[in-house]
Each structure stands twice: as C-alpha cells, then as structure tokens.
Image (tube, rainbow, N blue to C red):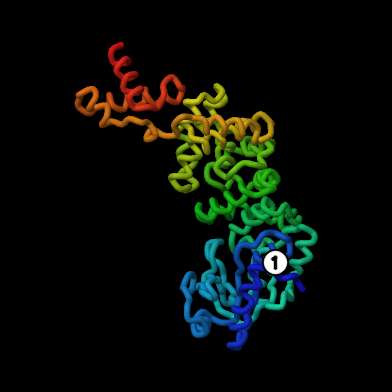
C-alpha cells in the first residue's frame, strides 16, 4: 500500500467511474514512481483496459490527443486526465517506434512494454501497488534498470538510452551494470532518433539536480558522439562537469558548454541550429555568451547593465562566478540594486522621442534621430543629465553647437 495524496485523490472518482462500467483502471508510470520517491507530482497518468471508444461512451467530454496509440484526454470534475488503453507493441521500426499498437486487456502485459522497472508500477484506487517487475525494490536501491533485457529494450527505442541518463541526472539513481553495458554497446542506435526527441531529453538532463554526474555518463557511454555537434567535444564536455553549476538554468548550461568551445560566431550558430532549438532560446543563449565574454574583459558599468537587461546580466554573472569556482549568486544582490537604481530601463522611458527632435531641430527624419536619442540615453544612464524634457532639449542643443 502507498499513502495516496493529491493529485491522485482527486482522480479516484474517475477510476471508480471506469470500473463501474466494467473495466480496469490504474495510476501508472512517472507519477507513481515520484509518489514513492517523495518527489512533487504535477499530473497523474492513468491506464485502463477500456479502449478509447469504450472510454468515450463512459465520459461525455473527451479530447483525442493520441488516439491511434490509445490515448485520450478526459475532462472530469474540472480537470484534464490522460488515459491510455493497455497495449502491447509489435515489432519496432527503425529503433524508435512500434510498427503497430494492439489494445489488450492485461495490465501485466502493458507494464511489460515500459522502459525501466521504476516506471512499470501501477497503483489502484486504494493505493495498492501492482509491481510485477520489482520497481519498488529498484527505487529503494536507487537503481535504474530496464524491464527485462536492456539490449532488447534499447533496440526497441534508442531514446530510452538518453532517458536512462536523464533519470540519472534528475534522481541521482545509479544505472545498473547490465543496463550500463547495453548503453555503451548500443549508443550508435541514437543515429536513428529525431533531433527533437534527443533535444528534449538533453535539456531535461541539463536541468537535473545531478547533472554533473550525468554529463560524465554521457562521455563514459559514448552517447555524446551521437548528439548534434558534440562528437568532437569530449574534453569540453568533461571540462564542463568540473564546475559546480547547481544554480544555473538550462540556457546558462548551454552557454557554459559553448564557452568551453571558443568558437567563431558561424560555428556557434550552426551548433545551436543543429539542435533545432527555438529561435528565441538561441538568441538568449547567444546573448548570455556575448555578455559573459564582455564580463571577462571588465566589470559591469551602468550602461552595460542597461544594455544587457537584468536577466541576461544576472545569468552572465552567475556563469562568470562559476567559471572562477565561486558561489553562483555572488554579487547578484549588488547587481540587482545597481540595475534598479538606473534612471531608465528602456529607450521608451526617455522623456523625449523622435518627434520632439524633429520639431526642435527642424530637420527631415534620418539616422541622426537614432544617434541623438542614443546619446541622450547614455547621458541619462550615466547620470550626466536628468531625464527631463527641457533639460534634455538644452543638453542636445549644446551638443549640436559643439
């Protein structure tokens, strides 16, 4: 028995409704694992012997999300629940997806197709555990081991190898010896996995509490060789694991890795694009890196702090500290106070605009407007003049005469 708590308790009436219609329903997967570990649970996954069509007959509000794989979303008591039909998977194609999915009525057979024993535990509405593959034991031992033969599991879906190292990063569990041997032997299967799926796992790995150990595992297993742009970066990746990067965000971790590479802009762009990261994230990482390099050259000035913005400046400062083996958040309070004391935070905070300049100088619009606004902006930030319309007008007129 397990001590059930929210969000499981909320979903118990859903399980009861499925059972009342003559089918089985259980909590499964990551939410059950996290309950047993004592981790925070965001949402629960439910598996049932009822097929999507049968579930739709029981519940009036459903959404098809992955109906061909047996998954639908049920809207129940103001909440959305993903319910997946028990299934077995036929032969896998190209090491990444089953050729077909067959709906079955057996919970045990459904659990048998899952990746790791800790993810193959089910729990009924009373909190009773169904654990045919001794996942609870693996959790007690803090061990990552596959359901059945790891060589078979990883050949079914190569991404499971990255999931093993990602869980190592998130939970700090060790990877069982036979599972580790399979990782080393089968790493090349990752060639068959889409970049998007690899990126998702890699970013979860970068965010994990035990990421230092996981980064080392990437090199020990040779998995790094089959990730975009990392094949020739063994020493850079290893070097990255030498730093205590406990407080860094995922974007800061990317920047830390790239800082080791000392690449030109072109190589940097190609590397980030190869991971198919969103454009916004790429810009953010590049910005962090650029300001980190400036920070190595000099201390923060008011103008630099203004141009970077607090988020980027704080990230660059954290990276700077870590690269000097100092506490990540050193100086951050002082940096925040300096930023907050800036007279303006963005160009539109200036008391003047392009229209004012045209009126005062009686000139046609052109690049001169931007130049004058930039000059006024810098003077205000450096507190050479006050951000008041008349003072700015007088100062700009004086500059014009010089």
| Residue at 32% from the left image edge and 15% from the top image edge | 399
Residue that carries the numbered disc 1 in the rendered image: 147
Determine the image quadrant of residue 350.
top left
Q: Is residue 203 above or below residue 76?
A: above
Determine the image quadrant of residue 90.
bottom right
Q: Answer with left or right where residue 37 lies relative to residue 336.
A: right
| Residue at 52% from the left image edge and 24% from the top image edge | 301
Q: Answer with left or right where residue 322 lies relative to residue 270.
A: right
Graded by Cα atoms within 10 Å as few (under 14), some (14 to 19) or many (20 or more), the crowding at tag 1 reads: many
| Residue at 56% from the left image edge and 37% from the top image edge | 315
Determine the image quadrant of residue 77.
bottom right
Q: Inspect this view and state whether residue 66 appears.
A: yes
Q: Answer with left or right where residue 10 lies relative to residue 305.
A: right
Q: Position of residue 75 (x, y in %)?
A: 51, 74
Nearer to me, 301 or 179: 301
Quadrant where the C terminus is found in the figure: top left
Q: Position of residue 10 (x, y in %)?
A: 62, 73
């Amino acid at each position: 028995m397990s001590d059930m708590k929210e969000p499981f308790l909320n979903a118990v009436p859903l399980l009861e409704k499925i059972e009342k219609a003559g089918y089985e329903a259980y909590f499964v997967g990551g939410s059950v694992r996290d309950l047993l570990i004592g981790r925070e649970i965001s949402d629960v996954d439910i598996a049932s012997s009822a097929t999507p069509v049968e579930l739709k007959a029981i519940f009036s509000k459903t959404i098809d999300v992955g109906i061909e794989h047996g998954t639908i979303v049920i809207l129940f008591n103001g909440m959305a629940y993903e319910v997946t039909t028990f299934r077995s998977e036929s032969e896998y194609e190209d090491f990444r997806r089953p050729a077909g999915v067959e709906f079955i009525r057996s919970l045990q057979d459904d659990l048998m197709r899952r990746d790791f024993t800790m993810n193959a535990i089910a729990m009924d509405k009373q909190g009773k555990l169904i654990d045919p593959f001794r996942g609870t034991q693996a959790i007690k031992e803090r061990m990552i081991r596959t359901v059945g033969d790891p060589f078979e599991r990883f050949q079914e879906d190569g991404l499971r190898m990255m999931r093993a190292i990602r869980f190592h990063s998130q939970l700090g569990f060790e990877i069982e010896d036979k599972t580790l041997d399979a990782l080393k032997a089968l790493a090349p299967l990752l060639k068959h996995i889409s970049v998007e799926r690899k990126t998702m796992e890699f970013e979860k790995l970068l965010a994990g509490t035990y990421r230092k150990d996981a980064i080392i595992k990437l090199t020990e297993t040779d998995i790094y060789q089959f990730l975009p742009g990392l094949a020739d970066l063994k020493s850079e990746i290893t070097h990255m694991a030498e730093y205590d990067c406990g407080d860094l965000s995922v974007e800061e971790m990317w920047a830390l890795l790239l800082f080791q590479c000392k690449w030109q802009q072109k190589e940097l762009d190609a590397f980030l694009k190869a991971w198919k990261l969103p454009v916004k994230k790429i810009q953010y990482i590049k910005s962090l890196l650029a300001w980190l390099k400036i920070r190595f050259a000099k201390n923060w000035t008011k103008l630099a702090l203004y141009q970077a913005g607090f988020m980027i400046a704080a990230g660059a400062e954290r990276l700077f500290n870590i690269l000097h083996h100092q506490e990540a958040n050193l100086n951050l309070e002082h940096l925040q106070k300096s930023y907050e004391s800036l007279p303006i935070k963005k160009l539109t905070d200036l008391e003047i605009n392009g229209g004012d300049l045209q009126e005062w100088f009686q000139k046609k619009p052109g690049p001169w407007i931007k130049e004058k606004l930039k000059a006024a902006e810098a003077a205000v930030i450096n507190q050479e003049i006050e951000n008041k319309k008349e003072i700015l007008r007088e100062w700009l007129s004086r500059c014009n005469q010089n």
